[in-house]
Image: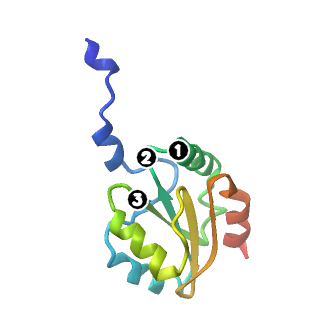
Amino acid sequence: MFNLFKRDKSDKATKKPEGVNWSILDKTETLSEIKEASKEGLVMIYKHSVTCPISGSALHRLERHWDKEEMQGITPYYLDLLRFREVSNQVAQEFSIRHESPQILVIDQGQCVYHTSHMGINYEDLKKMAQD
């Protein structure tokens, strides 16, 4: 009975967040695919720390506002940076952006054209980019 109230933290890191049709970024090789895909449309990388309350809050806000129709112009990727630290480091190096968490990068034509972190993560800014 008391097990009902216990949280399985190991499961939390492997679950795909709801609300957004996320692709999971868990391999450094995927960065080449992201750069290639960004030649056809915008790609967003959300770098998330499952242990950070600010990261959780930013993710929740983003998912709560996400409208698939409005955001058709952006392909979203989710990176659990604690589980895939080497991927997170490669993202920072590949796009010449200092690592932060939470952090959003928007990739266009193989380059990071927008990045923000913490409370700067704003659905309306992303929506404008998706609709341009």
Amino acid, disc 2: Val
Where's residue 88, x and y in %?
A: 41, 67
Q: CA distance from mark 2 to mark 3?
A: 8 Å
The residue pinned by badge 1 equals 56
Amino acid, disc 1: Gly
The residue pinned by badge 3 equals 81
Mark 2, Cα crowd under 10 Å, few <14 / some 14-19 / many 20+, is some
**Helix, strand or loop under label 3:** loop
Say whether disc 2 or disc 1 marks the residue closer to the N-terminus.
2
Question: Does the residue at mark 2 contact the one at mark 1 (Cβ under 8 Å)?
Answer: yes
Residue 50 is marked as 2
**Helix, strand or loop under label 2:** loop
Where's residue 43, x and y in %?
A: 54, 74
Mark 3, Cα crowd under 10 Å, few <14 / some 14-19 / many 20+, is many
Amino acid, disc 3: Leu
Locate the C terminus by quadrant: bottom right
